[in-house]
Amino acid sequence: MGDPTVSSMVTAAPGGASTIAGIEEPVSSGAAAPERRDKPRGLWGDAWRDLRRKPLFWISATIILLLLAMAAFPGLFTSVDPTHGDLSRSREGPSADAWFGYDVQGQDVFARIIYGTRASIVVSILATVGTALIGGAIGVLGGFRGGWADALLSRIADIFFGLPFLLGAIVILFTFNTPGSNKSTLNIELLVVTALVVLSWPLSMRIMRSSVLSAKHADYVLAARALGAGSGRIIFRHLIPNCLAPLLVYSTILIGSFIGAEATLAYLGVGLRSPVISWGIMIADSQEYIRVSPQLLLFPASFVVIAVLSFVTLGEAVREALDPKLR
Amino acid sequence: MSNLTVSEPESQAQGQPTGRLLEVEDLRVEFRTQDGVAKVINGVTYHVNAGETLAVLGESGSGKSVTAQSIMGILDTPPGFVTGGQIRFHGDDMLKMDAEERRKIRGHGIAMVFQDALSALNPVYRIGFQIGEQFRIRQGMSRKDAKQRSIEMLDQVKIPHARQRINDYPHQFSGGMRQRVMIAMSLALDPEVLIADEPTTALVVTVQAQIMDLLAELQRERQMGMILITHDLGVVADVADRIAVMYAGRIVEEANVYDLYAQPAHPYTVGLLNSIPRLDEKGQELRTIKGLPPSLLKIPSGCPFHPRCPRAQQICVDEVPALRQVGPHRASACHFAEEVMAGG
């Protein structure tokens, strides 16, 4: 490495790759390239620079943005009223009028999928973020503190871990969202999110705790302490960036299972209810007609798959960007 | 280097300031494990002054690294507990300070170089960011100034093309260069004492010599006190002023380098010196010290070295030999130190 030719080769590679960025700044290229390399960047700045070069990141990010737009402004994507039913068209197949056909009630499946995005995406994203934040924070705390604090937090997590997921969710939702009560959609969504978070944070906590436990004894943490870094600095600068990857991967998978969980709860009648539309409700409604009209299941299910796949891909891309060894 | 005397423990009142930079006195550390209490450090006393290099020599498990970790305050507790003694920095006992006071000494007062630089550098940050962080946080420098200072630090440890390499990640450096980065990081805040814990063990032999030369040079330039922890007798000869030999959590001999090599005063040191392979003895069997270091869970009675010692007598089994003065500027913890020195 001491050899000058080798090190200049090493430094040349990233410099050549930054030509895309150079377009924004039309300075004379000779002086601009080293100047750009000199710019001090943090962990996230580097990760972003790396992400910009990944096609998979752009594809998944575009799909996710599209889904978010569908959730925010469903009116932009369809002019059909998703609740308008024409029984004469019940279970009609796809056509130019209705791309995905009509469901049992003669409602436009495409419009319903568009309008169903909001409930599915909002619930799954909020629940995932909540799980990652709460589980991650408790995991870092337990892993870093150790001793009795860790024992206490781990036992509490074990208690929640022991609750059967479906049964627990039914009990929570049945208590606070009694069938027949007249709660607003947002209210019910938040209740579902709370139920999902309460019942699934322990696994996130365990993942984070175990990564922190192993990273805590790494020499670079010891070295940071030996150079006078305080606990906060060690947690935020050293532990979290090095421990984030497993939690990130798990969280992206969790988004998918939460879309499914929301569907299950809706099907059981304790989650969202008609007239609110969600992908889950649509999948649940289609189950009686799977053999005669499989498209009723196929279309909402493929949206679930696409959404999950996009989030998983995005998570993977971010994880790779955060690991300098893969750059 | 006028202050080379090894003071006798009796003559020195406990806790009295002696004007020395860093002193460890009668340090005791134990590890409470499931198998029992391992007494890892059993009364270690040594000191280092500004501009002086003390080499701490010993086998694996002799407690040299644990002593360093106790000084830095990075001992893993539990299982490790400091059960007695003092660690004085500028005369103040660090073991009595609160966590915040101790933290302030780290980096500025005492810093440490770790054995394996690859694992001691955070893999997710560019090295310029890691070195510069200290300037930004501890000295409130701007990002730009911190970067400039980081480049200067890399220059000081003789990393070629410092201006470019500052943007590299730890895994992009070779072993020797990485250790230089580690040294630059430790020296960033201009510490008064540098503890180097086996800084060359993970390196190739030729690179070892370069790193040792670099450390020696930096120590001279900055007039730092340096504690060099090693198990390699060859490494210390050129660099150290004094050597403290450790065995089973005790200092068994302390002397300046020349005396120690010329006339060892402890059978263990004799064994160590004899076990260095020599070119003029080609074809002969290597002379090793028989037996193994004792289990720290069950340290032998009396002198801990007696089961392996060729001159062990009944007194060695019964009585722990104290570290006593056996000549000008030197001490030994052997009942028969004088005989050993006489070469008998």
Image (cartoon, coloured by chain):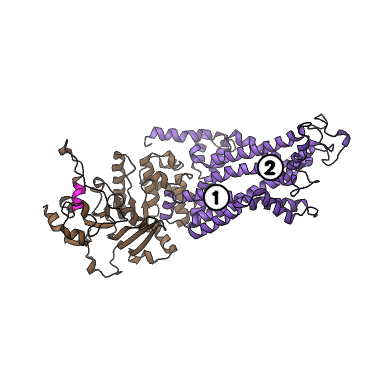
| Residue B158 visible in the snapshot | yes
Q: Is residue A13 magenta?
A: no
Q: Chain of mark 1?
A: A
Sequence-wise, the earlier of marks 1 and 2 is 1
Report which quarter residue B71 is drawn in.
bottom left
Amino acid type at circle 2 is Gly
Which color was chain A given?
A: purple
Q: Percent position (x, y) of residue A207?
A: 54, 48
Residues at discs 1 and 2 both on one chain = yes
Q: Chain of mark 2?
A: A
Against B130, is A109 above or below?
Answer: above
Which color was chain B given?
A: brown
Q: Percent position (x, y) of residue A302?
A: 70, 35
Q: Which mark is residue A260?
A: 2
Amino acid type at circle 1 is Arg
Q: Main secondary structure of the magenta part?
A: helix
Q: How many residues crowd around disc 2 within 10 Å: few (fewer than 14), some, or many (20 or more)?
A: many
Residue drawn at x 53%, y 42% is A322
Q: Which mark is residue B244?
A: none
Question: Which residue is label 1 attached to?
Answer: A206
Local SS, label 2: helix
For marks 1 and 2, give the CA distance.
23 Å
Q: Percent position (x, y) of residue A126?
A: 67, 49
Residue drawn at x 30%, y 56% is B298
Against A199, is A106 above or below?
Answer: above
Local SS, label 1: helix
Residue drawn at x 74%, y 50% is A270
